[in-house]
Image (spheres, grey):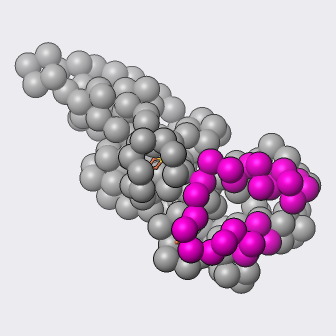
């Protein structure tokens, strides 16, 4: 899964991104966020704070919600990464994306990919969260625009639509 190239200090790193096997040549301590955005062309994950505080860079790594700005790419070797680009099925939005759209859960959109992935992660583990549990599940993701009410409503709405609509990853 990892093969070091001593001459350049880079490593060949294999991982799966949105179901697609990827072979990346990168410095082991490069941030997963940068590899996703610059090497994989997946710009959904955003850089807000760059230090693990805002959640705008959130992705799922083997089902766990991680701040990709804090994950050295070597740590992601052999894992299965899901980014916001991996949720929709072609032109059909994922149930959580649809709920955010309908409830006005996105304004400037910077926090939205991370917020949606945090919400999907929450519903992966909890079919019917209370509003308090939703608030807690999204507590690592900051939004400067919405005041959170529409975001919380969107997640509650997505939870209500289960199991007829896919709201997990
Ligand atoms: S950019 Fe990663 S947590 Fe803020
Ligand atoms: S929609 Fe702008 S930061 Fe959340």
- Residue 139 in magenta stretch: yes
Q: Residue at x 39, y 55 (%)?
A: 47
Q: Quadrant of residue 26?
A: top left
Q: Position of residue 105 (x, y in %)?
A: 66, 75
Judge from the rendering whether residue 108 lies leftward or rightward of residue 12; answer left or right: right
Judge from the rendering whether residue 146 lies leftward or rightward of residue 159; answer left or right: left
Say how many tags the image has. Answer: 0
Q: Which of the two residues, 5 or 70, is positioned nearer the viewer here?
A: 70
Position of residue 70 relative to residue 4, above or below, is below
- Start-end of magenta stretch: 129-154
Q: Residue at x 37, y 26 (%)?
A: 74
- Residue 130 in magenta stretch: yes
Q: Residue at x 77, y 55 (%)?
A: 135
Judge from the rendering whether residue 16 lies leftward or rightward of residue 34; answer left or right: right
Q: Position of residue 17 (x, y in %)?
A: 46, 46
Position of residue 34 relative to residue 116, above or below, is above
Judge from the rendering whether residue 86 lies leftward or rightward of residue 72; answer left or right: right
């Amino acid at each position: 899964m990892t093969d070091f190239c001593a001459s350049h200090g880079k490593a060949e790193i294999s991982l799966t991104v949105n179901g697609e096997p990827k072979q990346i040549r990168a410095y082991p301590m490069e941030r997963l966020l940068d590899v996703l955005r610059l090497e994989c062309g997946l710009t959904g994950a955003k850089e807000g704070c760059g230090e693990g505080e805002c959640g705008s860079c959130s992705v799922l790594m083997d089902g766990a919600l991680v701040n990709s700005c804090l994950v050295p790419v070597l740590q992601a070797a052999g894992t299965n990464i899901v980014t916001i680009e991996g949720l929709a099925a072609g032109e059909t939005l994922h149930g959580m994306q649809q709920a955010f759209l309908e409830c006005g859960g996105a304004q400037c959109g910077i926090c939205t990919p991370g917020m949606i992935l945090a919400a999907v992660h929450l519903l992966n583990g909890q079919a019917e969260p209370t509003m308090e549990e939703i608030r807690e599940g999204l507590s690592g993701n900051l939004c400067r625009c919405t005041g959170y009410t529409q975001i919380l409503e969107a997640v509650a709405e997505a939870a209500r639509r289960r199991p007829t609509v896919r709201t997990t990853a």
